[in-house]
Structure formats: structure tokens, C-alpha cells
Image (cartoon, rainbow, N blue to C red):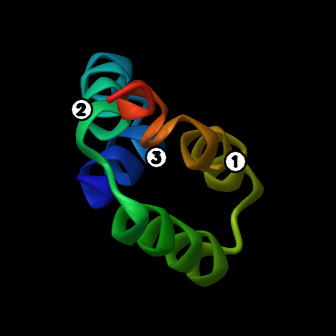
């Protein structure tokens, strides 16, 4: 899903980005966070980083009360 998000981001596909964000926020895990951090390091692209960093804070928060 992270790769789909990055591809959508790089191609300005906002509808896909929005759908993927909601999915990752709901079902993402620590593995997802680690993968996002790896992508940020590999890409070294400030535009991609700007949009991926907030996901690190969102992932898993929707399940905190469970």
C-alpha cells in the first residue's frame, strides 16, 4: 500500500492517495511505519517525505482505544 501511495503521490492521483491514507491509518502496523521510514530514506525526495511523515503519526491511532 505504501508503494501505491508513493506512486499516486508522484503522479498527482489525489483520489488514490486519499483512499490509501484511510486504509493505512486503519490497518497499518509497526511494519508499515518501518517501511515508510525506509522509503523516505531511499527516495530522499522532500515532496514525498512531506506527505509520508504525517502517516507515521496516523498509523495505529484509530485502534488505540481497543
Q: Which residue is mark 2?
A: 23
For the residue labelled by badge 2, is the local secondary structure a helix, a strand or a loop? helix
Image height check: is 3 above or below 39? above
Q: From this viewpoint, which residue is outermost toward the front?
A: 66
Q: Which residue is mark 3?
A: 10
Image height check: is 33 above or below 48? below
Q: Quadrant of residue 60?
A: top left
- Say which quadrant the C terminus sits in: top left
Q: Position of residue 13 (x, y in %)?
A: 34, 27
Q: Residues within 10 Å of mark 1 (few under 14, many from 20)?
A: few
Q: Which residue is mark 1?
A: 47
Mark nearest the camera among 1 and 2 is 2
Q: Quadrant of residue 51?
A: top right
Mark nearest the camera among 2 and 3 is 2
Q: Residues within 10 Å of mark 2 (few under 14, many from 20)?
A: few
Q: Residue at x 31, y 49 (%)?
A: 28
Amino acid at each position: 500500500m505504501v508503494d501505491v501511495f508513493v506512486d499516486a503521490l508522484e503522479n498527482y492521483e489525489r483520489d488514490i492517495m486519499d483512499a490509501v491514507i484511510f486504509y493505512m491509518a486503519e490497518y497499518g502496523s509497526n511494519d508499515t511505519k518501518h517501511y515508510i521510514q525506509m522509503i523516505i530514506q531511499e527516495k530522499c525526495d522532500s515532496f514525498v517525505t512531506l506527505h509520508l511523515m504525517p502517516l507515521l503519526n496516523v498509523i495505529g491511532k484509530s485502534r488505540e482505544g481497543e
